[in-house]
Amino acid sequence: MTSPIIDFMLKRNSAPIPELREPAPGDDEIATMIRIATRVPDHGRLAPWRFIVYRGKAREEIGEKLADLAEKREGPLTEARRNQELTRFSRAPLVIGVISSPKENPKIPQWEMFLSGGAAAMSLVLAANALGYGTNWITNWYSDVEEGRRILGLAPHERVVGFIHIGSYEGPAPERPRPDATALYADYAGPWEA
């Protein structure tokens, strides 16, 4: 089985966020990545997701707000802990938030819409990688905090699928152990029996 697409997907991995550098994708590349990210299974054609582009000075402003929020939640932060929050969105030159924005629909469950957002996030990662950029998909503590989501531009009904950190990356990203795929599937053997 020889295919450049299969070879590309078999080698896909995440780059360390602190090692993602300029140049980041430009406007045309971002538009292409997002067009690709929207070509995912979407039952009912609801587009139950959206994307927020974090770049430039906005990344530092978000860091200030997240550091303040962390301090409200945890009490006084050490300098190292505050710096960790200050740089959450400025370690990579570009971050794209993939946001689950479910629609009301009597036939399509919200969990299915959230899964569609996961497919959009993975397609965004693959598109950025195909354009030659390194990526890393994370969520982090602020994704599960109402005020954190508000700071990051989400409406109250929305949830974070992931923040895709994107930038130029030199060399192959470090490989990590992968599961034995042959142990993860089997032919159907009938209904579940405890």
Image: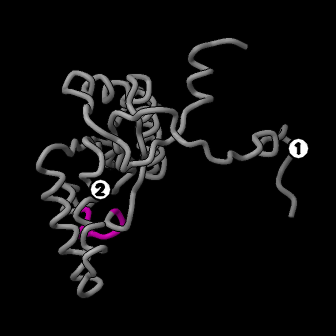
How packed mark 2 is, by other alpha carbons closer than 10 Å (few <14, some 14-19, many 20 or more), is many
Q: Position of residue 6 (x, y in %)?
A: 62, 20
Q: Foreground: 107 or 30?
A: 30
Figure quadrant of the C terminus: bottom right
Helix or strand or loop: what does disc 2 sit on?
Answer: loop
190 shown above or below 28 = below
Q: In front here: 70 or 17?
A: 17
Residue that numbered label 1 is attached to: 189
Residue sitting at x 77%, y 44% = 180
Q: Position of residue 102 (x, y in %)?
A: 34, 49
Query: Within the image, what quadrant is residue 25 found in?
Result: top left
| Residue 128 relative to residue 70: left or right | right
Distance from label 2 to label 1 (Cα)? 39 Å
Picture quadrant where residue 170 is located: top left
On residue 158, the disc is 2
Please tell me whether residue 147 belongs to the stretch shown in magenta.
Answer: yes
Which comes sooner in the sequence, label 2 or label 1? 2
Magenta region, residue range: 143-149
Q: How is the structure coloured here?
A: one colour
The circle drawn on residue 20 is: none
- Residue in view at x 29 percent, y 42 percent: 96
Instruction: Tell me if residue 13 is in the magenta stretch.
Output: no
Q: Is residue 94 visible?
A: yes
Q: Is residue 172 above or below residue 90?
A: above
Query: Which label sits in the foreground, 2 or 1?
Result: 2
Q: Give percent across and percent down for residue 114.
A: 43, 49
Q: Which residue is pictured at 35% across the width and 49% down the height?
A: 163
